[in-house]
Amino acid sequence: MANTDSVGLRVFSLNCWGIHYLSKHCPQRYAMIGDLLCKEQHDIVLLQEVWSEKDFLSLKQKLASTHPHSHYFKSGVIGSGLAIYTKHRIHDTFLYRYSLNGYPYMAHHGDWFGGKAVGLAILNIGSLTANIYVTHLHAEYCRDKDSYLPHRVVQAWELQQFIRHTSAGADLVILGGDLNMHPQDLGNRLLRTSTGLRDSYSETAKFDGCENGMTLIADNPFISQKELGPFEKGIRIDYILFKDSSKAEIYCDFMSTTKGSVPDHPFPYSDHEALTAELSQSKTFADPLLLFLVDIVTEARTEVKVGLHCAERMRYTATRTGVMGLALLFLELAIAAVPWLALGAEQPFPRTSFYMLAALCFAILVTTFLLYIFYTMELKSLQGAEDQMRLAVGSLQERLRGFPLAQPHSSQRRPPEGLEPSAFDPEE
Amino acid sequence: MANTDSVGLRVFSLNCWGIHYLSKHCPQRYAMIGDLLCKEQHDIVLLQEVWSEKDFLSLKQKLASTHPHSHYFKSGVIGSGLAIYTKHRIHDTFLYRYSLNGYPYMAHHGDWFGGKAVGLAILNIGSLTANIYVTHLHAEYCRDKDSYLPHRVVQAWELQQFIRHTSAGADLVILGGDLNMHPQDLGNRLLRTSTGLRDSYSETAKFDGCENGMTLIADNPFISQKELGPFEKGIRIDYILFKDSSKAEIYCDFMSTTKGSVPDHPFPYSDHEALTAELSQSKTFADPLLLFLVDIVTEARTEVKVGLHCAERMRYTATRTGVMGLALLFLELAIAAVPWLALGAEQPFPRTSFYMLAALCFAILVTTFLLYIFYTMELKSLQGAEDQMRLAVGSLQERLRGFPLAQPHSSQRRPPEGLEPSAFDPEE
């Protein structure tokens, strides 16, 4: 772990390919990833495609002692899939959801439903303020005729805007993730040039991993040659980028990737290779900051919780109505089927009523389905805000403990005698 | 206008209530607003509810000599309604769209379709970097039973996050807009406390305007007593907030609001009152910055334009298909109506086919309608990115002119001899 005089940081990034029932060996691979992270104890772990919050939570439990701080970024219908685990306290988070992300009717590509975004977590590492970004851009399904290219370019544009505009106060910037772009692709150049972020693969003093730093390789049994197209050996689309400041000069000492197979295991961690970068620096200065916000943020959190309950109720009502619509439809079909099965018996169901009722059932089903989707998105947003507020309150309380006189009511909120501060950790 | 030694800034903010056909006297009021702005020549003009881009463009034309720089923030189905006109060069813009904004089926409230957001424009005023924010939060339709409160609190939360995270590099921060919150409302306290923004109404040395700085008043003929509820005289929901830095100490010398009527005109500028704040400061230092991005941003802009054309074509196809579905429905109804009109004549249309065809027509209409909405949102996002890129290229080119040797290819892009630099202004 970092001390106040020097920072040695090990950063890990992996696209986990965590689509339950669709991705192969999903639970086993999560177990392997958990074991790896426990053993390696990186300072910062950036994961993508953690589509299920349950997986995030079980990893969180497993990493409780090695990586006590974590955050899961909620967005869209399914979620953003982005997660961060770290040894260092997370003081603040922020999520920017890309304005374009594919098409809802291209359901087999699924990107639209994922709510692709860039997550920011602000960490204090030693006395440095570090802005840690994790992102996952729209996939490239066909390089020759890539109809999503404008969307990906807009995402890269918004990503660089977000990083530039939010990192002015940072002493250290790290971006990890699956950019779905080759090193010299337009969006990648746009991102690196406009933010000044440096590629740890290009900058590293020592490298151990796949040829050309590739992260989607033919040797990975989950990858078909078809996916790689003309790039027979593989492509490099996952990155750890970093940027230093006048306050902290940063170097990449060592970088590594996994190589498609894991010793003593029958399959790799994911269809993507995992990246690890070891960054180091020396000079640091202190720059403390104090805000007086606990009461207001707590109140806001209560308000958001009210909204959460309300949205949950609405979603439940929509589900119930939908189920009723479905039941009505089955009932109608059953009634209509009776004379049909009793060959030749007279049809008791007037045809007009039959069609009208069926149309009504369909209308109910479509409406409730759309409402369900909508309330799910609303819930994600509310939960996302609530999470961030919880984190902010925790961070503020921690700071107030150090400055008890600065906040008149802080004594009420300080831990009772004998109780360890960790019991007040808002991350629990 | 500002010089390098001191800054005297006049900031204007108005919710224009620019809903064509629904808002009263819309064209006449825009003409009045244009005249006012031409005459008053504020440094920065922040407008909300400019729902039609045409109105933005006609105002832009009218203000070409007084406010040569402007930006319209695109978002959502209709747009964000946010616009900025300024005397000072806009160097960069960024838009954050709130993750929650009401419900699409509450169409009569309309907020969801507006794509409420916060726009950021970065200006260089003298040698200061000023972050100018303009926003419009979700309306409050019923204060006692406000089902949108969690949405508005999340918006206020995201607004303060956005301002905090993006303003670290700014010497001066100004936020203008319709917050739809009373001064002591939770969201408002959250915003002010967490960002450190100060209310120009509370801070001003001299004030001329409505009692208690109200901006939605009973004396305004467009406002009904019902809208104000228990607040008989009016409420204060529009604000100009500001924040200084160690580099620039800022004061509010004077603030004013309109008072519900305009001399020599039969009605006011809007249903909201307009705000003007005069801010001043003294010390400044220089801090130049240079980026080498023109080629890449230009390339990205081309890519986005390709996407734009594609989305336009898709939207056109959806519209055409929808029109065909509608025509088919009318045709069917006409055929079915013939025997019905010719009283008693035999019905030539088999009932089953009739219903199936009608269902098909409806399905086409619903699908094409949803697609139309979707492509409109896509177009807005693409156009928004394209606008920002154009602005960025212009700003970069301007900087490169001052540092011709820093960019190897810059000579190709420099204005030919005898051509005024203004001919290359990207704002045109």
Image (tube, coloured by chain):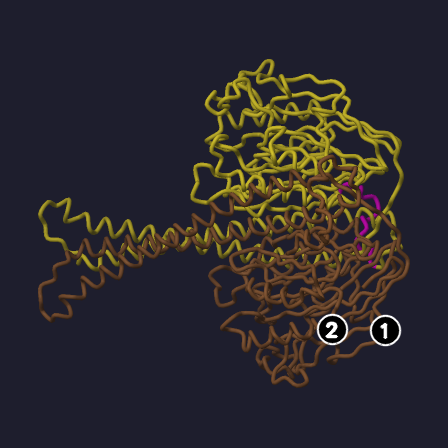
Chain colours: A brown, B yellow
Q: Residue furthest top?
A: B264
Q: Mark 1 highlights which residue?
A: A205
Tell me which segment is drawn in magenta: B409-423
Q: Residue furthest front?
A: A418
Q: Is residue B57 visible?
A: no
Residue B205, numbered circle: none
Query: Which mark is nearer the camera, 2 or 1?
Result: 2
Q: Image quadrant for the N terminus of chain A?
A: bottom right
Q: Quadrant of residue A218?
A: bottom right
Q: Position of residue B390 (x, y in %)?
A: 69, 49
The amino acid on which the numbered mark 1 sits, given as a three-letter code, is Ala
Image vertical order of residue B321 relative to residue B153, above or below: below
Q: Mark 2 highlights which residue?
A: A40
Residue A37 vs residue A278, the one in the foreground? A37
Residue drawn 74% across and 30% down?
B43
Residue B77 vs residue A423, the one in the foreground? A423
**Does the magenta-highlighted stretch encompass residue A95?**
no
Left or right of residue B245, residue A271 in this image: left
Q: Image quadrant for the C terminus of chain A?
A: bottom right
Image vertical order of residue A113 relative to residue B169, above or below: below
Residue B186 vs residue A275, the one in the foreground? B186
Q: Residues within 10 Å of mark 2 (few under 14, many from 20)?
A: few
On the same chain: label 2 and label 1? yes
Parent chain of label 2 = A
Q: Residues within 10 Å of mark 1 (few under 14, many from 20)?
A: few
Q: Position of residue A396 (x, y in %)?
A: 72, 45
Parent chain of label 1 = A
